[in-house]
């Protein structure tokens, strides 16, 4: 059995893919204020499709030993995203938001996790999305609000006040990962799926960059 802590393996094995997604052209320009409120709204819509699928996948196996170790309803983002989209588009937001091809592929991958034995892969997606989300959410919300004139009521996605202080929560999450009793094959599957999750994110960012190629 591998003795390296799982959280360490995940961090090391996904470092390159993580950096690629985080430093994507779309996100770099979005955080630099070079895009528009429309671009942010389109991005938020893609997140809704992703989290709706992810949270269905997590809930379907939340009572299992593996997924139950990290599943936490306080992390769920779907409802927050729906509030944000209602602010951005109005009550008819479901008629306005359109899924991009890369997002559809991401969602299809998440929907494929309903097969027996897929729990480590579900944890991989849970880790990639939520552990990244809770880091700096309030700072990101404040920056986006200032850059694009977005009301805080449209930035609920970034508010993780329900889980309390972030550093201890993040540490506890990593400890829960490290305490999972997984075979080497399960660990390998989890890490490979985490890498795939970052690749899915990068593909969504690439399509958004093509959709919004220039400054606002």
Image (cartoon, rainbow, N blue to C red):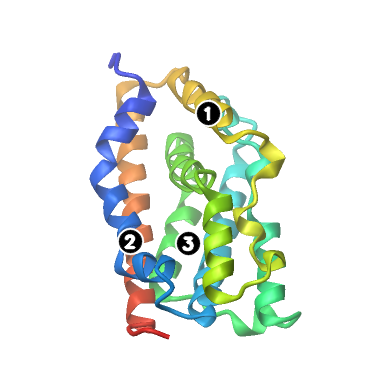
Circle 1 — which element? helix
* Residue that label 2 marks: 202
Quadrant for residue 84, please give it.
bottom right
Q: At numbered mark 2, what does the secondary structure look like: helix, strand or loop?
A: helix
Q: Is residue 100 above or below residue 126?
A: below
Please tell me which of labels 3 and 1 falls first in the chain: 3
State the SS at label 3.
helix
Q: CA distance from mark 1 to mark 2?
A: 24 Å
Q: Which corner quadrant holds the C terminus?
A: bottom left
Residue bearing the label numbered 3: 107
Foreground residue among 132 and 52:
132
Q: CA distance from mark 2 to mark 3?
A: 14 Å
Quadrant housing the N terminus = top left
Q: Residue at x 58, y 43 (%)?
A: 58
Q: Which residue is mark 1?
A: 173
Foreground mark, 2 or 3, reads: 2
């Amino acid at each position: 059995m591998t003795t390296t802590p799982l959280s360490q393996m995940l961090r090391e094995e996904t470092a390159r893919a993580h950096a690629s997604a985080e430093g994507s052209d779309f996100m770099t320009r979005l955080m630099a204020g070079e895009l528009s409120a429309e671009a942010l709204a389109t991005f938020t819509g893609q997140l809704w499709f992703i989290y709706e699928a992810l949270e269905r996948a997590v809930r379907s196996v939340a009572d299992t030993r593996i997924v139950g170790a990290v599943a936490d309803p306080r992390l769920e983002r779907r409802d927050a995203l729906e509030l944000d989209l209602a602010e951005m588009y109005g009550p008819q937001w479901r008629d306005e938001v359109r899924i991009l091809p890369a997002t559809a592929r991401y969602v299809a991958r998440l929907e494929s996790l309903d097969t027996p034995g897929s729990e480590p892969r579900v944890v991989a997606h849970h880790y990639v999305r939520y552990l990244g989300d809770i880091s700096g959410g309030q700072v990101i919300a404040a920056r986006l609000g200032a850059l694009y004139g977005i009301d805080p009521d449209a930035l609920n996605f970034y508010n993780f006040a329900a889980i309390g202080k972030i550093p201890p929560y993040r540490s506890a999450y990593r400890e829960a990962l490290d305490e999972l009793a997984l075979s080497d094959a399960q660990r390998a599957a989890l890490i490979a799926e985490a890498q795939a999750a970052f690749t899915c994110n990068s593909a969504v960012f690439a399509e958004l960059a093509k959709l919004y190629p220039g400054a606002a």
